[in-house]
Amino acid sequence: MSLAAVMITVDCAEPRELAQWWATALGAEIAEDHGDFVIVGAKPVALGFQRVAEQRQGKNRVHVDFGVAPGAGLAAEVERLVALGARVVGEHSVPGLSWVVLQDPAGNEFCVH
């Protein structure tokens, strides 16, 4: 296959502000700033933040899942993200997997497991 995921792009009202939040949350840096489109150089997939006029409505149709580094602890990572401005939406589990659904400061949902 010749396709590879290289970036996930999030539509938002304030790309610089949201990109900076995600850069801090991921311990990454802003790799490119084109004003209305800002890229966070996260690994293995970059995150793009694109200005759009429309307001977010309803639940995300696509979201990003992040794994906690071994030994870091899910609860500690969720607490760190909440301290940065995320909001917990729910906690879920199935046999062998637990995850927490959060929202970033713009209301975009993501999961941490």
Image (cartoon, rainbow, N blue to C red):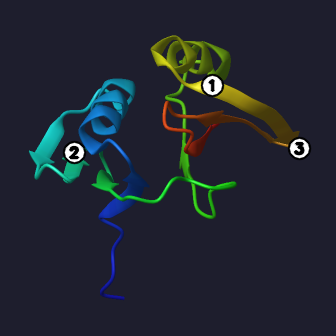
Query: Label 1 neighbourhood size at 10 Å, few (<14), some (14-19), many (20+)?
Result: some
What amino acid type is highlighted by mark number 2? Answer: Gly
Residue at 60% x, 13% y is: 79
Alpha-carbon span between mark 1 and mark 3: 25 Å
Identify the residue at horizontal 14%, vertical 49% (top origin). 35
Q: Is residue 21 above or below residue 99?
A: above
Residue 40: % across, % down: 24, 44
Residue 41 tag number: 2
Neighbour tally class for label 2: few under 14, some 14-19, many 20 plus, Cα within 10 Å: many
* Residue ID for mark 3: 95
Identify the element where label 3 is drawn.
Answer: loop
Q: Nearer the viewer, residue 75 or 22?
A: 22
Amino acid type, residue under disc 3 in the picture = Pro
Point out the tag, 2 or 1, that comes first from the N-terminus: 2
Q: Earlier in the sequence, mark 3 or mark 2?
A: 2
6 horizontally vs 33: left or right: right
- Residue 74, picture quadrant: top right
Q: CA distance from mark 2 to mark 1?
A: 23 Å
Task: Identify the disc placed on residue 87.
Answer: 1
Q: Position of residue 5 (x, y in %)?
A: 36, 68
